[in-house]
Amino acid sequence: MKQPLWIGGPPAAGKTSVAIRLARRHGLRWYGSDTRTWEHRDRAIAAGSEAAQRFESLSPEERWAKPPSELVALSLHRERLQMILDDVRALPERPLVVAEGTPVSPAAVASGTIDAGRALWLIPTRELQERRLLASGVGAGQARLYRALRDLVEEEATELGAPVLHVDGALGLDGVVAEVEARFAHALAIAPHAATFEERQALLRESNLSVVGQVRGYFARPWAEGDADLSVQEFQCECGDPCCTETVRLAVGDAARAPVRAHAPR
């Protein structure tokens, strides 16, 4: 593989926030597996996955009432790793990719598919995960799934000796980003990165459009209700400044139509 940087970990670990901050600061491409969720589900259905087919056959209420072990199976946690690897292989050679997601399994390090020196799993304490789940307002069923995934990822990382950064909230986002940068210092120093300001803006636009695709993919499911383009989400400012950390809450349709700006471009 073109050696990307990999950030794994359960939901509410801060993977996406850290990866986005790294990508912006260093002029890299962000790949978030959540943005490919519905594409991956369609691929699994086409491949005959019983779990993927069962997920679609259930109403959201029926689905989230399932026990944690079944929720993990329905999430396609195991099946999606290969899809993620395939996605990353298909990305352009430049700039370096920062790829993150819960299905990025420590097993990929054990098998040699992922270079341990270019991978890190963020494991939140149970207390931190609970605080973040409460703040996010996720439903009871999703919370059960996320707790189960936390324990599963931690167990696998420990058993397989994968590189781990335990997160308890004390460092804040900036502190965790600094820790991850230190772990990846050599790779970041030699990484191909966006060479121009315009390339940085294009990468940010690409990132925001991937979120647009994620939301539209959800609302396209036959059991989903509502209008994707009216859904309000958080998007990165596309000003192109590597030091900018601003986000903008916008309707998906508005974010799709024009670059997102919290600040005027230079």
Image (tube, helix red, strand yellow):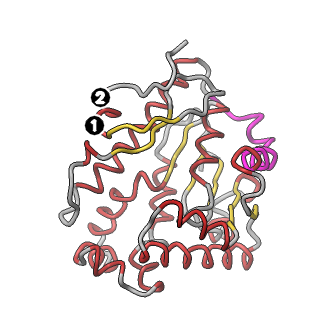
Measured Cα–Cα span from mark 1 to mark 2: 6 Å
Residue at image position (20%, 59%) is 225
Which mark identifies residue 211? none
The amino acid type found where label 2 is placed reads: Arg
Quadrant assignment for the C terminus: top right
Circle 1: element type = helix
Residue at image position (42%, 51%) is 35
Of 52 and 234, which appears nearest the observer? 234
For residue 253: magenta? no
For residue 187: magenta? yes
- Is 237 located above or below residue 48 in the figure? above
* Span colored in magenta: 176-193
Q: Which residue is mark 2?
A: 257
In the image: residue 228, left or right of residue 19: left
Of 135 and 101, which appears nearest the observer? 135
View extreme (top): residue: 266
Residue at image position (23%, 62%) is 224
* Residue 234 visible in rendering: yes
* Residue 78 visible in rendering: no
Query: Disc 1, disc 2: CB below 8 Å?
Result: yes
The amino acid type found where label 1 is placed reads: Gly
Q: Write down the quadrant of residue 11 in the picture.
A: bottom right
Q: Which residue is mark 1?
A: 253
In the image: residue 68, left or right of residue 127: left
Number of other residues with Cα within 10 Å of mark 1, as a class: few under 14, some 14 to 19, many 20 or more: some
Residue 100 image position (x, y, % from top left): 57, 54
